[in-house]
Amino acid sequence: MKCQKTAILLLKRKDIDNIKLKTTNTIDVKEFIEAKDFDPILIERSYYVAPDTKRGAADKAYSLLVRVLNETNKIAFGKVIFKDKEHVVALRPYQKGYYNAYVALFR
C-alpha cells in the first residue's frame, strides 16, 4: 500500500490478519516469572522444545537457560512466530534438558 507521509491510513481487522510474518525459528524471551505464579488455565496448547542440533552456540545458550530456570524455579515468557502469527509462549524446564513451551491464550 502506498500513501503520503501525512496521510492517515485506516486498516480493518482482516487487513491486519492478512499480514504474513516471517517464521524465525527462535523464541524471543522477554521476562521471567516465578513458576508458582503461572496459572495453567492460560495454556492453549503445549509443545516440546529442543535446540537445533546444527548450531553449537545455540545449544550452549539453550542448556544455560534450562539450568538457570531449573535452579531459580522460574518460567520464561517470550514471543515466537510460527504459522505466520506471533504467539506469546511460556517456557518451563522439562525432563532431560527439554522445555515445555506453552502457547498462552492472551494475544
Image: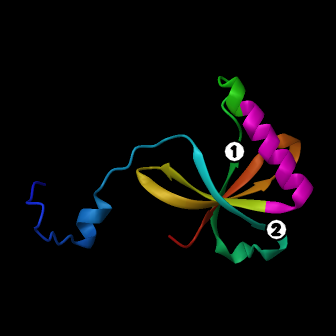
Give whichever of discs 2 and 1 has the lower sequence position.
2
| The disc label shown at residue 29, or none | none
Q: CA distance from mark 2 to mark 1?
A: 18 Å
3 w.r.t. 28: above or below: below
| Residue 16 x/y as whole percent | 29, 64
50 w.r.t. 104: above or below: above
| Residue 9 x/y as whole percent | 15, 69
| Residue 27 x/y as whole percent | 60, 48
Q: Which residue is mark 1?
A: 49
Magenta stretch holds residue 61: yes
Name the one closer to the observer, 90 or 41: 90
Tell me the magenta residue range.
Answer: 59-74
Q: Which residue is mark 2?
A: 35
Q: Taking the image as drawn, is residue 82 in sight?
A: yes
Q: Does the magenta stretch mainly form a helix, a strand or a loop?
A: helix
What element does badge 2 sit on?
helix
Image position of 65 (left or right of 11): right
Task: State the residue at coordinates (10%, 54%).
Answer: 2
Quadrant showing the N terminus: bottom left
Name the one closer to the observer, 20 or 45: 20
Image quadrant assignment for residue 71? bottom right
Task: State the residue at coordinates (9%, 59%).
Answer: 3
Magenta stretch holds residue 67: yes
Q: Amino acid at mark 1?
A: Val
Neighbourhood count class around disc 2 (C-alpha, 10 Å): few under 14, some 14–19, many 20 upward: some
Q: Amino acid at mark 2?
A: Ala
What element does badge 1 sit on?
strand
